[in-house]
Image (tube, rainbow, N blue to C red):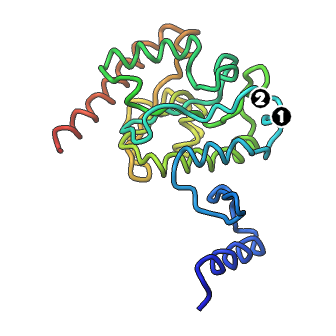
Amino acid sequence: MSPPNTLLEEARRYFEQQSLFEDRWFVKLPEGKPQPIRTLDQLYHHMLECHKCPLADTRTNLVFGVGNHHAEVVFIGEAPGRQEDLQGEPFVGRAGQLLNKILESIEVPRDSIYITNILKCRPPENRDPTAQETALCIPYLEQQLRLIRPKVVVALGRIAAQYLLNSAAPINRLRGKVYNRVGSKLIVTYHPAAILRTPGLKRDTVQDMKMLRKILDEKETAT
């Protein structure tokens, strides 16, 4: 019987030949042997070497995500903005300050959740992500969710909502409901940046956050 390391190398070569192997599932140890990615820290260091799209060449920092690695709630936005790119952390600008207030309103400490984006690098001039950029970056988000295993996912804004629900519907039709997605509940609400532009969206956002609070309270009661 072949030793485990030989079997792993054989499997890797087979999937590469079949164009099915995805290198995101593995990291290289110093001796060069591939090992499965089992932690967010491993995934982060792996992503530092990612240059699958041109955004990696124009970013100041990789904006991987921040928060509790075992969070019950994961908030997912669209892409980093200027301040996020400079600091390497999502939601630190005006939108982040508003998100903090939203979390305070439902008594959810920011350090108890995890926050990330669809894209981990800032698109120039804060434009919408392209289909290619999204396709290349989405597997990293999916791996983050697999590692965290949240009870609730909150999609912030149209782009995150449409991807996570595989829907082209406008956000006002997607919000206000509770969805099931790969072992997690999912709700949709407006991106804080949209609320800053259109304050009238705040009322609906408050209702969405009450829905989140209710889901968390029900889970606490069940346990």
- Label 1 sits on residue: 57
Relative to 222, say whether 202 is above or below.
Answer: above
Q: In this view, does 170 lie to the left or right of 215?
A: right
Q: Position of residue 66 (x, y in %)?
A: 52, 31
- Label 2 sits on residue: 59
Looking at the rendered structure, the kind of residue marked 2 is Arg
Relative to 195, say whether 188 is above or below.
Answer: below
Q: Position of residue 200 (x, y in %)?
A: 47, 9
Q: Nearer the viewer, residue 35 or 30?
A: 30
Q: Quadrant of the C terminus?
A: top left
Q: Is residue 86 left or right of residue 124?
A: left
Quadrant of residue 44 within the rendered picture:
top right
Relative to 190, say whether 76 is above or below.
Answer: below
Q: Do the residues labelled 2 and 1 touch (CB within 8 Å)?
A: yes
Q: Position of residue 210 (x, y in %)?
A: 31, 23
- Under circle 2, the secondary element is loop
Q: Which of 131 and 111 is in front in this view?
A: 111
Distance of mark 2 from mark 1, alpha carbons?
6 Å
